[in-house]
Each structure stands twice: as C-alpha cells, then as structure tokens.
Image: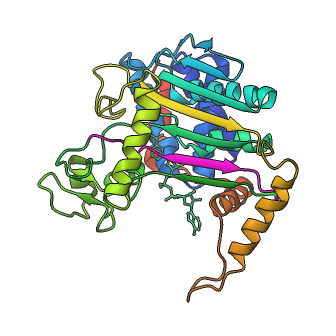
Amino acid sequence: MKISNIEKIVKKTFLNFNLSEKHSKICAKYLVKAELVGAASHGLARLKMYCERIKKKTINPKAKIKIKKISKSIAHIDGNNCIGFISADIGIKVAIKNAIKTGIGLVAVKNSGHYGLSSFYAEQAVKKKLMVWCFTNAPPAIAPYGAKKSLFGTNPICFGTPTGNKTPFILDTSVSMINRGKIRVAAKFGKKIPLGVALDKFGKPTTDAKKALKGVQLPIAGFRGSGLAWMVDIMSGVLTGANHGGKVKDPFDDFTGPQNVGHFFLVIKPNLFVGKNYYKRIKENIKRIKKLPKIKGIKEIFYPGERMNARYKRNLKKGIVIQKNILEDIKNLNAIK
Ligand SMILES: NC(=O)c1ccc[n+]([C@@H]2O[C@H](COP(=O)([O-])OP(=O)(O)OC[C@H]3O[C@@H](n4cnc5c(N)ncnc54)[C@H](O)[C@@H]3O)[C@@H](O)[C@H]2O)c1
C-alpha cells in the first residue's frame, strides 16, 4: 500500500479517537515510519493498543502539554498523559532549538507514554547537524542482575551524530537481548524466539514467546546491561519526575492508570570543541574502522544506522505490506467512535 494512503488511514483512526488534527498527524507519521525502517513491532501493531488506552482513559487524547523553561538551555515538559510520540516530538524540538541558540539543549519529559523508536527523535537533531542522546524508560521486562523479577524496561539508549556523509550515525539499541516488541509479535504469530534472550516464570530459558512475556527478559552482557538499564531508569524516570523503579505501566496489560513514562533528550553542537574540524575527524574515524580486515562472511563493516537508513529508503519506494489481522484491527477501529 502507498505510504501516504496508510498515513491517512492511521491519522483518521486517531482523529476518531479524539486526537487533534496535528497530534493525529504526528502519531500516524511515527507509526508508519516504524514500518518503513523495518521495526514492525513498534509500528501499526500498536495502533489498537493506543486506541484501547484512550478508550479506557489511560491516555489523554486532548493533552495540554506544558513546557517549563528552566534556563536558556534546559526545559522540563509535562506531557499530561498524552501518547508518547507527541510530548517526545515537542521535547526533541525544544532541545534542538536550545542547542542551536546556546550550544546545548537538555529536555526532560514526564507524564508521557511509549514513544516508539528513539531514532525518530535522534534523526531530527542530526538533520540539523547536531549531536544527540535520547533515553526513555519502559515497563518492567528485565530482571535486575541478581533478581528473580522483572523491574527495568528494555530502556533503549540512543546516540546520533552527523557524519558529513549522507547517512548519519545513529546507534539505537535496547539494553535487553531483544526488544520486547519483537517478543510480542512472535507471540501474536505463534513464532519462536531465539534461545538465550528470555527465561520463563520459573527461571528456565525458553524459546516460547508467550512464556517469555510471563517470565523475564535477559539484559545484554549480564550485570553490565542491567547497570545500563538502571542508568536509563534514573535519567528518564527518577530525574524527570516520571514513574521509575518498575512503576511504568505496561501499555498492553495494565489499564489501571496512565503509564507516566519519562524521556531525556540531550542535544549539542558537534563543533563545540574542535570547530569545523569535527567533520574531518568523524569521517576519518569511520574510514579507519571501515577499512579494517574483516572476519569470514562479513563483506562490509556498517556503522549503526546505515542499514536502517537503506531499509527506510527501499521501503519508501516499494511501499509496505500490512498484515491481514492489523488491517482488520484498523477497519474495526475506524468503525468505533
Ligand atoms: N520506546 C520504548 O519503550 C522502546 C523500548 C525498547 C526499544 N525501543 C526501540 O526499538 C528499536 C529496536 O531496538 P533493538 O534493540 O531491537 O535494535 P537492533 O538490535 O535492531 O539494533 C541496535 C543497533 O545496532 C545497529 N546495528 C544493527 N545491525 C548492525 C550491523 N550489522 N552493524 C552495525 N550496527 C548494526 C542498529 O543500527 C541499531 O543502532 C529501537 O529503535 C529502540 O529505540 C523502544
């Protein structure tokens, strides 16, 4: 299906659920973009969940988002329990504006919700020739190192910089072995997950996605990944005023109240310390790494974001295929008022 048509349908769905024209457009754009970069787990499969949460009053479709200026560089945003895309979109735009003016922009967001892919926000900064860090916390999925119970989210860490090439460097990674969305999609379609990414509720390794959702996900690199998840929870939750320490609500399973997710955006000018030389230096850095001798089976060393960018461009031309059950969901949602 053509991208512009899908965006229109998704936008209409959000309009039906009382979001404003502007907010519906933002949410539709981000959901469809997730499909375009090949992250279906964060795309249209989530549309029904957002609508359910609006219906059950755990997302505020008419959120009045407040921006509190703390200094010329720093702002604190209260998302008023909106869909995360909306407050995060405002957050990154404020951080970018402040970084352009002062060299550094720092924005903390509270009372937000699931914001999709961190790279959505990093890209906006990088397009303006800025360097960026994005963090968000998420509902319990990972057991802290040494604990039996999930508490940390898959808490992605994202860093982006312009490279002087057409494709920016954007590292955007969960701190779990695989992201939870992929496990949800596997559970929905009855597919297995790889061994070594999750334990069942009895603490046994499992490849059954449904059992994994009831058990715990494993962090990357043992206690190191657990520490990174903890760091993101402190930055996105403790610092911002959002929920933290396992209190972020699961968007699919917990309708007892708003999620209150927190986000943290830091944007800087990359020329702060080395002036115009930054581009020369980053190009040289990438060149040195790409030139290294490769192990068997590897033709090219990619930097983070390179393959995602290529996928995005390919899919933009080709269009995307929407799964039958998701099309069904969309039809039903448009019928519900
Ligand atoms: N909002 C939330 O609550 C939430 C939670 C978890 C994850 N996410 C999002 O889910 C998305 C997917 O996360 P993920 O952990 O599955 O990412 P992933 O494992 O697909 O990729 C992680 C990183 O590795 C890079 N990469 C992949 N293959 C590479 C290769 N061959 N060479 C070099 N680099 C390579 C990618 O560009 C990316 O930056 C992210 O965008 C993340 O922000 C969101």
Q: Residue at x 24, y 44 (%)?
A: 150
The quadrant where residue 321 appears: bottom right
Q: How is the image coloured?
A: rainbow
Q: Residue at x 56, y 47 (%)?
A: 158
**Dominant secondary structure (helix, strand or loop) of the stretch shown in magenta:** loop
Observer-nearest residue: 319 or 85?
85
Residue sitting at the far bottom: 296
Q: Residue at x 40, y 27 (%)?
A: 238
Observer-nearest residue: 253 or 6?
253
Left or right relative to 217: residue 294: right
Left or right relative to 296: residue 228: left
Q: Residue 270: x, y in percent? A: 76, 45
The quadrant where residue 254 appears: top left
Q: Residue 40: x, y in percent? A: 51, 51
Eyeballing the image, is 173 above or below 239? below
Q: Residue 48: x, y in percent? A: 43, 33
The quadrant where residue 11 appears: top right
Observer-nearest residue: 55 or 275?
275
What's drawn in magenta, residue-wise? 151-165
- Whether residue 6 is visible, yes or no, is no
Left or right relative to 164: residue 64: left
- Whether residue 49 is visible, yes or no, is yes
Q: Residue 197: x, y in percent? A: 31, 61
Eyeballing the image, is 285 above or below 275? below
Q: Residue at x 26, y 52 (%)?
A: 145
